[in-house]
Image (cartoon, helix red, strand yellow):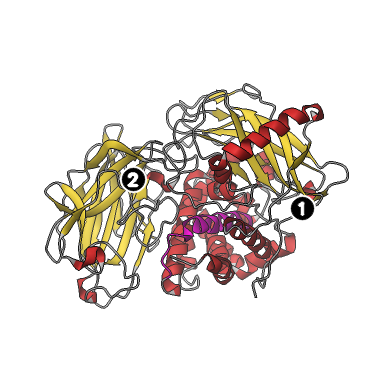
Amino acid sequence: MNQRFRALDELEAEFVRVTAHQRGEEGRPGLVRRFAGAGRTGRLAAVLSGVVLLLVTSTIALAATGVILTGSSVPPTGLLGPYAGAGLPLRGQSKLLPLQVADPYGGLPWGMRVVQTTRGLVCVQIGRVQNGKLGELGIDGAYHDDGRFHPVGPGVLPAYAGGASEGGVTSERGNCVLADGDVTGNGEAWGSAVAAEFTGVSENAAFAPNRKLGPLQHLRNIAYGILGPHAVSVSYREGGAIRTEQVVAGVGAYLIVQRTAPGSTQQGHGEAPGTDTPGEGPGTSGVLTIISYEHNGKICENGYNAATGHHVKIEHPCPAPNPYPQSLRVTPPGSFDRHPSIALKVSHRRVIAAEVSFSAPFPVTSAAEGYSLELKPCPSGREGGGGAVLDRNVAQGATVHLVLAYPFAARCQRRSVSVEVIYDSSGPDAKRSYGRTPGELLIGSATIRLPRGDRAAAPALRRHR
Amino acid sequence: MADPEGFVPFYRQEAEAVLLFLTRRTLDGEVALDLTAETFAQAWRGWSRVREDSREEMRAWLFTIARRQLGNYLRRGHAQRTAIRHLGIRTPSVHEDDLAAIEEAAGLGDVRLGLKVELGRLSDEQREALQLRVVEEMPYEEVARRLGVSEPAARARVSRGLRALQRTLAAATVADGGVS
């Protein structure tokens, strides 16, 4: 710990704890031995039995909360099965888009396809196209350098080359960006925006991992995305000129492949702030300069170069969207008031976790929905916060268990801590509680109290020097 | 694939640069710390899939995430907390002296001075919100009370104003440790 700012030291301690936890270094906590909560101590037996059942049967659910009470390691977000995380590819739902772009050095054209998953997410993939199939070339160490074209299977969700910034999933090879890059509850499905860029990549859109790629002058920059049904066209820089291309209607897909500038040694990748909403945000990636949308029967434009921070000249700017759509109904307070039950995990008389359980008022059927747990921050400032997220499907009425690590760690919460249970949703059926962000519905709250004789535990601070 | 052991040293190496980068663009040390926490939480979730390239490439990747968090904040009016919640991370407290040190290191005094002209070009609504929050440094609760709106609405108003000022902020902060 040697940060100049105390807050960064404290945040470092959190990452030390989380990374150690996920590497399986944490000790094995003791069994649940005590129940506390909003005055419902008489339910100890029921909670105990529920927790024991949870430990036996619900590893995925626990992994999704980021806390494993049995000491198992937590895999990174990825393919957890058809009903958790990103889900699995839907059979027959892999679709090559009608979009083919020439490579600046020749050879097979580039294409783009989308793969839908069982949890309503959309994976966007790019690659070379031959005979109507997306694939990769056997070069640069791939496929034993056989020089042949290898189609990517219809159900393959490959990794986002070079590492996902948030939503990429690890499976096979190639590139993949999930719509909205989010698989933990706020994910939006088809129609949401993806905008990604690869700089200085090979004929397979790969970086140079531990092998030498071709000559630097044969590298290319690729920008691609889906911008939703409102998008009409994109404008981008090509040498010293600005070019405009129509996007694929209905999904707003675009794909741009350009030579890497001579002498450039840059290699990188990233997700750019594309958007499917006219007027919302800059809406362009580094190479793009303008995105045109159809808005109420007229064409309008978003333009802002996110890479340089420079505005571009906009003839017909899109109006700013209303952040609170009128169609989003506000649910009166208390409409879905649940009374979650609380079980504490205690190790060596220190409370290391709290499990919050409640009956689900709504089913979770996709990554666009979910339940989360939020700690109320301390009244004097920002301390506190944190929580847990359910990252899997649940049936209506099923019991949901969310685990909160170190509930009494904040200085203002040494004796008790208030938690809120939120149902997260998006899309036209999204719900909202008064005073909360659209899509967040408060369904219950509870106060977790530190039992007499026990102490609050805080994450262990480890020094790595 | 990046070594899991390398994440905390990576954090230690880059956290301050990310925090100052975000502070300069949000003019708010508290919001910047939230965004920094979410940025590193997202980075940790993608860590197993990152190839351990040069420091510059790793840094570029990290700042891509930071910019995305910033973009989300400017669009939505609140910091995304998805990965933080997923990992069960608690955002730390910011003490008054710490906050002052962060904002001083970010050079916010100069940035604020330079914004006076630009503030005049905003709508009355946005200017007033920014004046209260950024210049007078009031908590959002007080900003909301003064404006007669809910706290989420006050936050949204401030973030929309900041979005309108991004050109100025970007121009004033081109020297963000080589990443702008």
Q: CA distance from mark 2 to mark 1?
A: 41 Å
Q: In the rendered structure, the residue with mark 1 lies on which chain?
A: A
Please state which amino acid type lies under the numbered disc 1: Ala
How many numbered marks have been drawn onto this rendered protein structure?
Answer: 2
Name the residue located 69 percent from the left edge and 44 percent from the top edge.
Answer: B142
Mark closer to the chain start, 2 or 1: 2
Pick the residue in front: A218 or A195: A218
Q: Is residue B147 visible?
A: no
Determine the image quadrant of residue A268: bottom left
Disc 2 residue type (three-letter): Cys
Vertical placement of residue B9 versus A56, above or below: below
Residue A123 numbered mark, or none: 2
Q: Which residues are magenta?
A: B29-52
**Identity of the residue drawn at 50% across and 73% down:** B177
In the rendered image, which quarter is residue B53 located in?
A: bottom left
Checking the image for residue A38, the label placed there is none
The single residue placed furthest to the front in the displayed view is A56
Would residue A415 appear left or right of B56 to someone viewing this image? Answer: right
Residue B73 covered by magenta stretch: no
Res. A457 mark = 1
Binning the other alpha carbons within 10 Å of mark 2 as few (below 14), some (14 to 19) or many (20 upward) gives: many
Residue A429 lies in quadrant:
top left
Q: Quadrant of the C terminus of chain A?
A: bottom right
Q: At which x and y percent is residue B116?
A: 55, 59
Q: Is residue A415 above or below residue B91?
A: above
Rendering coords of residue A23 (x, y %): 57, 59
* Main secondary-structure element of the magenta-colored stretch: helix
Question: How far across and down, in percent of the image, does residue A149 sit?
Answer: 16, 57
Q: Chain of mark 2?
A: A
Residue A176 in percent (x, y) is at 33, 52
Q: Horizontally, is B85 left or right of A342 in the view?
A: left
